């Protein structure tokens, strides 16, 4: 189970890095679209945080 959690964490982190790398290129998008992208990024960061907490044995 820990291997599956670590694999999921790596997957989430890769997604975070991909989204982070794409942010500067997206600064000229309309406000609603930019807000949606930032909200999606925030949700992804929360998922990574929860996964790290679970891996470390703490509450999510």
Image (spheres, grey):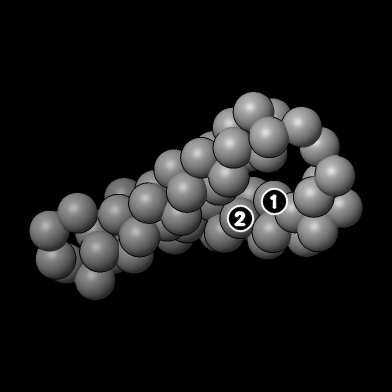
**Residue 52 figure quarter:** bottom left
Residue at the limit of the structure toward the left, as seen here: 59
Q: Residue at x 35, y 60 (%)?
A: 49
User: In the rendered image of this protein, does residue 54 appear above or below residue 47?
Assistant: below
For the point 68% across and 35% down, the residue is: 31
Q: Residue furthest bottom?
A: 56
**Cβ atoms at labels 1 and 2 below 8 Å apart:** yes
Question: Furthest residue to the top?
Answer: 32
Q: In the picture provided, is 42 more to the left or to the right than 54?
A: right
Look at the image and tell me in which quarter the C terminus lies.
bottom left
In the visual, does 42 lie left or right of 27? left
Q: Residue at x 64, y 50 (%)?
A: 15
Residue 20: x percent and y percent?
A: 69, 59
Within-10-Å neighbours for mark 1: few <14, some 14–19, many 20+: some
Local secondary structure at mark 1: helix
Q: Which residue is mark 2?
A: 16
Q: Which mark is residue 58?
A: none
Q: Foreground residue, 57 or 18? A: 18
Residue 43 in view of the camera: yes
Residue ID at (14%, 66%): 58
Query: Based on the displayed image, in which of its 4 quarters is residue 10 positioned?
Result: bottom right
In the rendered image, residue 7, in percent from the top left (x then y), is placed at: 51, 54
**Residue 25 x, y percent position in the rendering:** 87, 52
Q: Which residue is mark 1?
A: 19
Q: Nearer the viewer, residue 32 or 13?
A: 32
Q: Where is residue 53? Give x, y as percent.
A: 25, 64
Instruction: Work out how far the residue at label 1 is from the one at label 2, CA to CA, in angstroms.
Output: 5 Å
Which is nearer the eye, 3 or 15?
15
Q: Is residue 51 visible?
A: no
């Amino acid at each position: 189970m820990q291997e599956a959690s670590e694999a999921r964490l790596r997957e989430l982190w890769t997604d975070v890095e991909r989204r982070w790398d794409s942010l500067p290129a997206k600064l000229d998008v309309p406000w609603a679209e930019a807000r949606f992208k930032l909200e999606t990024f925030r949700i992804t960061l929360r998922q990574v945080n929860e996964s790290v907490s679970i891996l470390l044995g703490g509450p999510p």
